[in-house]
Image (cartoon, grey):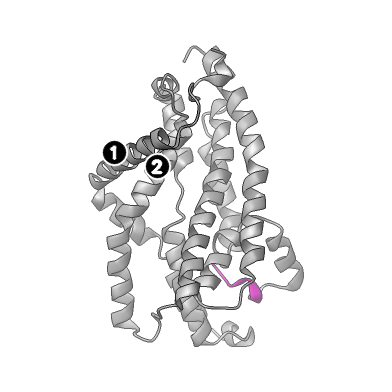
Amino acid sequence: MRPGQRGLPSRGWRPGRTWRIARVLLETQYAYMLEYRAEIALWALSGVLPLIMLGVWSGSGAAAAAGLGPERLGPYFLAAFLVRQFTVVWMIHVFEEDTLQGKLSPYLLQPLLPLWRYLSAHLAEQATRVPFVAVMLLGVALVAPGMLRVPRPEALVLGVLAIGAAFLLRFLLQTLTAMACFWTERAAALDRLLMIPYLFLSGLVAPLETFPPLMRRIAMATPFPWMVDFPARLLAGEPVLAREGFGAIALWCLALLPPIAWLWRRGLRRYGAMGA
């Protein structure tokens, strides 16, 4: 078997077998994540930046100058908080550790692409977040009852689908960055570098309509607004071109897949040449 083919399934695709593998992966990863409930609770608490920014915007005159009243700020930043909670991706940090310590080697000997393991771990971690996020939303409802609104059924369904699509886009973007682990021992620094445009161009720090027109056009040409602003506005019940948003996410995902596959094959050759 060529190095570039390691970790790929050797049999044809069968739906029943694929479902069994996916179910076992998710159940195993969920049980594993339950052992780290306290740490996941801290992770959930660390994702309150949108709520902090809500307080900042509400306490300044910039919101009124931008035409954003409390009836828009509250639902938007609360929706951005939910989006942030369920689109967290930490794959590059685990992948970096696995490549440096040789933990990736046994995964490559199994007839399953290792990236599926990392994806299932993220989905399991999201499932364990649900009760913590629910408690935090209950706290928001007690402190500010008017802020928590139940979206319309169609907006809720589209918002949940948009969160899933945004997570997939962010996972693929970080997977592309993680491929640098085959060439450097500090690939996680690239993710920290990408965090800067993610924070400022995604809509976490400020709604995109508060940006100058040129800056807004630049932001919309990047993948970051589709990771937060688009699903948050759907959940908040704001007028959104859903077809355009989902189309943009699909195009970005399709654009990321070829370089990921190419770097994966090249990286595995280098990983094998180093004796791992």
Q: Is residue 119 above or below residue 152?
A: above
Residue 201: percent from left, percent from top: 62, 62
Residue 267 horizontal side relative to residue 95, left or right: right
- Given residues 257 and 271, the one toward you in this image is 257
What amino acid type is highlighted by mark number 2? Answer: Ser
Q: Secondary structure at mark 2?
A: helix
Residue 91: percent from left, percent from top: 46, 41
Q: Secondary structure at mark 1?
A: helix
Query: Where, by quadrant of the figure, is residue 143 drawn?
Result: bottom left
Which of the two discs, 1 and 2, labels the residue nearer the N terminus?
1
**Marks 1 and 2, how far apart at CA:** 9 Å
Look at the image and give the residue range highlighted in magenta: 205-209
The residue pinned by badge 2 equals 120
Residue at horizontal 53 percent and vertical 47 percent from the top: 192
Residue 13: percent from left, percent from top: 49, 31
What amino acid type is highlighted by mark number 1? Answer: Thr
The residue pinned by badge 1 equals 28
| Residues packed near mark 1 inside 10 Å, few (<14), some (14 to 19) or many (20 plus) | some
Q: Is residue 135 above or below residue 40?
A: below
Residue at horizontal 54 percent and vertical 63 percent from the top: 228
How many numbered callouts? 2
Q: Are marks 1 and 2 in contact (CB under 8 Å)?
A: yes
Residue at horizontal 30 percent and vertical 67 percent from the top: 134
Residue 186: percent from left, percent from top: 52, 33
Query: Where, by quadrant of the figure, is residue 33 drawn?
Result: top left
